[in-house]
Image (cartoon, helix red, strand yellow):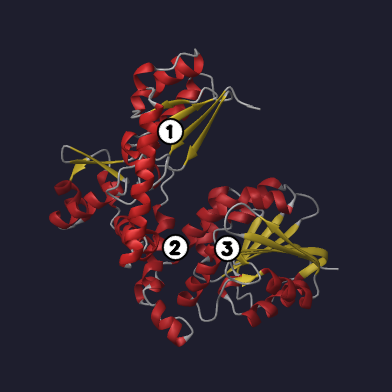
Amino acid sequence: MEPFRHHIFICTQAKPEGATSCPGNRSWQVLQALETELCEQGLDDDVQVSTCGCLGLCDDGPLMIVYPEGVWYRKIRKEDVAEIVSSHLKSGEPVSRLVWRDPQEMKAKAAKHRDQYRAMIKAKGQAGVLPDELNEMIRGFMPSRAVLTALELDLFSAVGDGCSAKEIAYAIEGDERATEMLLNALVSLKLLEKKDGTFLNTPVSARFLSASSRDNARPGLMHTAHLWNRWSTLTECVKSGTCIERDEREQKGVRDFIAAMDRNARERAAAVVKVVGVNGIRRMLDLGGGSGAYSIALAREMPNLNSEVLDQAQVIPLTQAYIRKAGLEGRITTRVGDMLRDPLGKNYDLVFVSAICHMFSAEENRRLFRRIYEALAPHGRVIIQDFILEAGKTAPRFAALFSLNMLVGTRMGSSYSEPEYSDWLQNAGFSDIRRMPLPGPAGLMIGFRN
């Protein structure tokens, strides 16, 4: 059974740098052009497009197979896509000049490729060569550091609509030779383009990394640049068991941290609101609410909701600015306080705790949950959003790695598991405890006061 008129497969199997591959021959550009063309020619609902692994014919890529006919296209360029869509997919006439019609040649080349690949793997194994995946993991800091440096220098804004290395170096107050080296590296990472000595932003970097864009994410991403300094102390932290003293530069990163948390919260707010629901909540306490993004999202969905954001003294002025921008000063208030020591208040219908528990020790979380229970009205609920580990604490990967982020950045923080959260909530008096999955790396734990 074929639910679509056509089903297309395009190879996007990545290979080690220098090896011939369909992505190396720009199969991703072909894929993007195909998806765009299908929409423009009104075939989006009739044609299913799937990426696939290596088809064993790398020298002739990019490759595309069209079913149910089983037509193989080879060496396609993005400029060929419109013709394939209009002639083959719309009118039923394959584009002959691109069709590969020699099955014996195809089979022979695929067999040769297979044998060469197996011989290479065997030779590397016998020689004790580091596997490509492991080598790439170990050296993964290199592209990351290049991008973080570009963000620290606000380089993508300096590139603008196109500049030479000399012009960009002048704008960022950098050395011309060194700046050009960084620019070339960013081109290799596909975050810049280079044409006749002029460097240009790609659509991605222009949209998300340049100050001239409405969607500029640099302020939030600067928090990741600060994390670089923390992670460089991981070896010492593993030996000592806790974070080491932060330098003065990192202490000044509160604004960047709140911007990063606001970006994350806005991306996830709609999914959280859907889980929380809009009924029966009139008073909310947003513990460590940062930018107030979740209070803002919930207030917009619940006309009768009033929320209070409790956070540290250096954060609250930033919170107030976000609330003013949202036009919700009358319904979202702020309070400076320490959630582990200062009074939380009483009779809240909802206490929301997002990205907080991982900063505390297990005992601090136990104490916090008892305080939250006392702050809730009867039948009120607590909602905890965090990176929740499985019982064995080795998955999901992001949460396991985030534990190290807490090791280098907090006194006793960590990612915690679902059984730990359930145990703490139950011991604090909560009932009907449940875990609610969300798209992305974080999940929710919910408990109700009797």
The amino acid beneath tag 1 is Leu
Quarter of the image with the N terminus in it? top right
Marks 2 and 1, how far apart at CA = 39 Å
Whether label 2 touches label 1, CB < 8 Å: no
Q: Specify few, some or many for label 3: CA neighbours under 10 Å numbering under 14, 14-19, or 20 or more.
A: some
The disc, 3 or 1, on the residue closer to the chain's N-terminal end is 1
For label 3, the residue is 396
Quarter of the image with the C terminus in it? bottom right
Which mark is in front, 2 or 1? 1
Q: Residue at x 73, y 71 (%)?
A: 422
Q: Secondary structure at mark 1?
A: helix
Tell me residue 343's x, y (percent): 69, 76
Frontmost residue, 239 versus 254: 239
Frontmost residue, 252 versus 59: 59
Whether label 3 touches label 2, CB < 8 Å: no
The amino acid beneath tag 2 is Arg
Q: Secondary structure at mark 2?
A: helix
> Up-down: is 413 above or below 254?
below
Q: Specify few, some or many for label 1: CA neighbours under 10 Å numbering under 14, 14-19, or 20 or more.
A: many
